[in-house]
Amino acid sequence: MPGKTEQMTFRRTVRGFVAAAMVTAMTSGAAMAENLASALTSAYNHSGLLDQNRAVLRAADEDVAIAMASLRPTLSWAAEVKRTFGYSKTLQAQGRVNSTETTLALIGSYTLYDFGRNKLALEGAKETVLATREALISVEQQILLGAVSAYLNVRRNQAIVNLRHNNVRVITTELRAARDRFEVGEVTRTDVALAEASLASARSALAGAQGDLEIAKATYTSVIGHPPRKLSAPGSLPRLPGQKEGQATALRIHPDLRQVQHQILALEYAIKEAEADMKPTISLSGRLGATDSLNNGTYSRTGTITLGAEGPIYQGGRLSAVVRKVKAQRDQAKGNLHATRHGITQDVSTAYATLAVAAASIEASERQVRAAQIAFNGVREEASLGARTTVDVLDAEQDLLDARATLISATIDRHIAAYQVLATLGLLTAKNLHLDVVHYDPVEYYNLVKTAPTAKSRQGRQLDRVLERLSR
């Protein structure tokens, strides 16, 4: 039985083989290697989905500005030119009517009291903004996890192609040896045919692996934004908390959970707003106007101030239906919160279990590769002495190939599982990964628009510059 030192030496050898297989698999790329961090950076900058959802967030920010505007007075103008013509007859006189009047007016209005309806709409819009920010973080996590998978799957498939190429070379050598032994009568024609069939199978498997690699490259190009170059090893696994701590972290900061929480608060405000719609509104309005008759030179200037109140009496049941509808939406969101919380808990447990399985698979695969290598060397040596057939050699070679492929896949799966854990915890973001990107600040735009600035104000001009920068 091999000693502990021998096992450790072999494990280092196996890991070296896996690393070498993955590194040499990238020889078709550019001279400078691309690492995982740079690929994630490219995916972050390339993603149109991020731009799309940032625009969605800015639209939600504008809803706050719209709600803020409803708390302020409004001022508008009106102008008209009125032409009157026809025939008029009275007891005193009769004749044609032909006059032209011009009117110009300024109109102002302000809601004095509406039972808090406009303020409730403002608070609901703010909660919607916070929910949309969390949705943006969730999209960012999806993009980065997709980039990790695309990067590592290219490495996986290229390494498998490398193995398949090596397998074709080995079986070609075995076929040549079988033919030589057939010439001297050591083996039968059946052994040669078996070797030929095995070589054809190996070439078919190589073609399949090359097809998988092309698919992985196409996915990489779509996600990262450019074709894969020489991809370096992903390095060490990201630092992860323990599972218990991870569960607590996920239930505290996961964007999907926080999004639903803010949606519930927004709907609570919407219920109160709908209830306020049933109550009266008190408003103050004023009008200042001037009228000029172009026919007779008559001119008038008038002004009015109106304090008014209005409220619904009967709307056919629409207002009550709106209240019930929003309450149902609130209850739906609460149910979604319950499902989201349990889903996150399950996802965290699954992610940690997948990571543990991948780690165990690596250890088992290392032992499998070791045993398969020893078996292959022994069978090939015995075959040279006539104690084994060509079939035995080919079977041992296939077992070794399968073991090596399993080890490569398990190594890749462990890295993907580690980043999957980060995503389930809500930590797979450009900021937490320290990516070299210009981080999008959702607060910057919100702070510029939350007070509903006009286009000609200093803040409005600053907002125009921000929008121009974002469009670039």
Image (cartoon, rainbow, N blue to C red):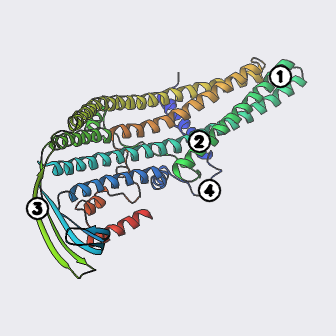
Q: State which quadrant residue 327 falls in.
A: top left
Percent coordinates x, y for residue 202 in the rendering: 72, 30
Percent coordinates x, y for residue 472 in the rendering: 45, 65
Q: State which quadrant residue 84 falls in.
A: bottom left
In the figure, is residue 12 to the left or right of 66? Answer: right
In the image, 226 versus 194, the foreground residue is 226
In primary-sequence order, the first of circles 2 and 1 is 1
Residue pictured at 48% horizontal, 28% vertical: 361
Residue 73: image tag: none
Q: Amino acid at mark 1?
A: Ala
Q: Secondary structure at mark 4?
A: loop
Residue 193: image tag: 1
Q: Which residue is mark 3?
A: 306
75 up-or-down from 212: above or below: below
**Which-is-in-front pick, marks 1 and 4?**
4
393 up-or-down from 43: above or below: above
CA gap between label 1 and label 4 equals 41 Å
